[in-house]
Image: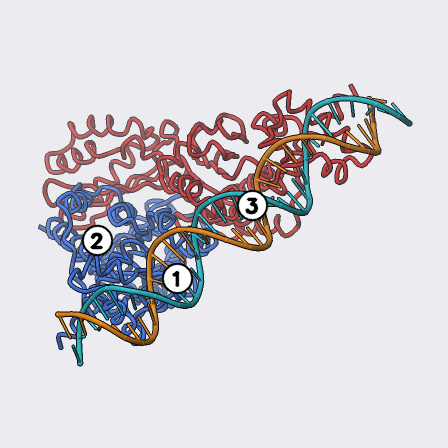
Chain colours: A blue, B red, C orange, D cyan
DNA sequence: GTTAGCACTCAACTCACTCGAGTGCTAATC
DNA sequence: GATTAGCACTCGAGTGAGTTGAGTGCTAAC
């Protein structure tokens, strides 16, 4: 048992060192820096075993060893010690949630910026509105031009969605107000997913003069299916260029291209399962361009039913401990923010 | 006179070639590809003159020559031939304006994506609301939660701004509607810059029960000064990595960092003067990180008084002709879109 | 004024060489 | 039986000499 224990201690040391330096780790390094009681020859023997077990790869005969994907998986599952954050780091994260938010959007992009600058990885923040759970609180039509108006939907949780509507014929401002008021009353609590249906019903029975507006509403509402994502922001893309694994511009380019494509980012973040945290390593990210990356995501349910997903993307030799600590601090701060908001 | 003409024809050939290849241009290349009647020795003499005039630099004795900043300036001012776009390119640009827009934002980000993919440079699109010119059309308060409501300002041009308001005490929904209706009538046409002032006046004379709301409005409206930017999007950052001038990761990083900082992008786009197009080369961009870049910007005044500024950023050896053609095509399509919208 | 010709320059490439960090194996040691 | 010292071996990275080729500048001839 002791033997096995030692093997994994050595593996852990190798991973730790590799995460720090990005250089293949040799037996002497381990013997000097981590296991001073053992000679390099002993370490060599153990490393040879670990390679056979599939935890280590050697780029070539005389280059030291590099952790395999399997090693990272083990590391994350079994060996992870959460790395405590410095006082400054904690304070910095808190400060991002501190100010009362008066801009409608922008929390995501502020968070993305903050997280990327704390971790030195790339951060993506997404807020999703699970449509099934959203129920209408109010509805308001605001005239914008002659034949256009802005439809504002406020959900029971306080989330706001807007949508521009084209009208067949000009409609008086006063009329829009009336329709808004009536509909708000009739539709309060209606799940967004059934909105279109209900509106069609109501349009049929509506007085002649507002039937046009009602029909436009029924046709155009709700914002189409994918409109689920209410905010998406990415920060610190350029951080990736600091890692030696991306000193090759072509590799960097293919990854950055992914991080510029909304759909791909969403797909990366959406793989998040039911757990609070998820760590996907290399091939587990399920995308060719990110097969040498890891993605750590965290998901928080907001009080209004929206779901906030945060992802940190970096090379597979990521500082998993630190990243998880940061994310859990974010979760805590976010929780406090929500409490305060409701209190 | 003919002599001088020839000199500049040669300079133009050098610039054209360098823009294409990014490689220092030698006398033989010019003699073979551009001026077949002249021997390389003659070209050499001319190039020597051009270097003395400050239009060419030589990286070292045996490496051909590279246009200087001064050469690009001359090129843009005097030699520029607009490069006609291919049918596909024109069609592609038009198609971006084709679909009727139903998302409230997103036109900028769609444009940024399209422009970067047509030009292979990085595109930034910004929509600015010159506050002085904005006048109120409607104002609407929508309850969001107990003590919060959403203030929606619609300007005469049809632009929409929103802002979340904290209330001292809970206010009934019906009351918010009443206040909205009354204020909309009283404030119609009021310049946004005077809104706060006018609201303070009105609050003083308002009935007791709505004075709280009015005061909150006066205090919090209008969105603070910098809130001028109503949309900002950047596309095709990763395009830059394809240029040999950024095969050095450190150079790429410092530039990409700029292109991730909202404030810096805004500052780059805001240097745009009164003209429709502006070309800023190298040091003229006024930023250390972009001293080897050029920025071509175009500004379009939208019908509602907003100003749309588009910038394309690339290495100084930019395809200025093509970029300007693209931008003028965009201007045309945008014009058509606006006409249609108003018609 | 133009050009052919030639000496010269210099980055980029190749090739042989060395260096050093690493490994694996074996035999001695604890 | 586990550990370690020792040694032969491997291989990338770095070094330096030599070669190549694209380029220049200058001069003399056309």
Question: What kind of element bears circle 3?
Answer: helix
Q: State whether discs 3 and 2 lie on one chain.
A: no
Near mark 2 (Cα within 10 A), the count class, few <14, some 14-19 or many ≥20, is many
Q: Assign the N terminus of chain B to one quadrant of the image.
A: top right
Query: Label 3 to label 2, Cα distance in Å?
Result: 42 Å
Per the image, the residue denoted by label 2 is: A158
Task: Out of A60 and B148, give the one closest to the viewer.
Answer: A60
Front disc: 3 or 2: 3
Q: Position of residue B77 (x, y in %)?
A: 62, 26
Can you say whether A24 is above or below B246 in the image? below
Going 38% across and 63% down the picture, which residue do you hit? A62
Which mark identifies residue A290?
A: 1
Chain of the residue under the numbered disc 1 shown in the image: A
Q: Position of residue A108 (x, y in %)?
A: 28, 49
Q: State whether discs 1 and 3 lie on one chain.
A: no
Q: State whether discs 1 and 2 lie on one chain.
A: yes
Mark 1 vs 2, N-terminal side:
2
Q: Position of residue A255 (x, y in %)?
A: 42, 56
Front disc: 1 or 3: 1
Question: What kind of element bears circle 2?
Answer: loop
Which mark identifies residue B119?
A: 3
Near mark 1 (Cα within 10 A), the count class, few <14, some 14-19 or many ≥20, is many
Front disc: 1 or 2: 1
Instruction: Please state if A93 lies on the left or on the right of A232 as rendered.
Output: left
């Amino acid at each position: 048992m002791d033997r096995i224990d030692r093997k994994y201690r050595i593996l852990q040391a190798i991973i730790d060192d590799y995460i720090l330096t990005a250089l293949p780790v040799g037996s002497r390094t381990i013997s000097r820096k981590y296991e001073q009681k053992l000679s390099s020859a002993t370490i060599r023997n153990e490393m040879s075993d670990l390679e056979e077990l599939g935890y280590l790869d050697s780029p070539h005969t005389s280059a030291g060893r590099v952790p395999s994907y399997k090693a990272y998986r083990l590391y994350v599952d079994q060996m992870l010690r959460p790395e405590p954050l410095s006082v400054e780091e904690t304070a910095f994260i808190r400060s991002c949630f501190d100010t009362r938010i008066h801009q409608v959007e922008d929390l995501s992009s502020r968070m993305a910026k903050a997280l990327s600058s704390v971790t030195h990885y790339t951060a993506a923040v997404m807020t999703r509105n699970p449509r099934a759970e959203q129920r209408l609180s109010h509805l308001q039509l605001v005239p914008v031009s002659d034949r256009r108006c802005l439809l504002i939907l406020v959900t029971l949780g306080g989330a706001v969605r807007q949508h521009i509507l084209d009208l067949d014929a000009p409609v008086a401002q006063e009329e829009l107000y009336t329709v808004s008021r009536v509909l708000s009353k009739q539709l309060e609590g209606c799940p967004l997913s059934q909105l279109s249906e209900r509106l069609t019903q109501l349009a049929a029975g509506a007085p002649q003069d507002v039937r046009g507006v009602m029909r436009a509403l029924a046709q155009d509402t709700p914002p189409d299916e994918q409109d689920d994502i209410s905010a998406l922001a990415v920060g610190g893309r350029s951080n990736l260029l600091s890692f030696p694994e991306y000193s090759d511009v072509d590799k960097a380019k293919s990854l950055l291209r992914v991080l510029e494509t909304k759909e791909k980012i969403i797909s990366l973040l959406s793989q998040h399962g039911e757990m609070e945290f998820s760590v996907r390593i290399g091939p587990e990210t399920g995308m060719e361009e990110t097969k040498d990356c890891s993605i750590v995501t965290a998901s928080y349910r907001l009080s209004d039913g929206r779901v906030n997903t945060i992802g940190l993307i970096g090379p597979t030799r990521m500082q998993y401990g630190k990243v998880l600590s940061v994310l859990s601090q974010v979760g805590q701060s976010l929780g406090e923010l929500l409490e305060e908001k409701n209190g």
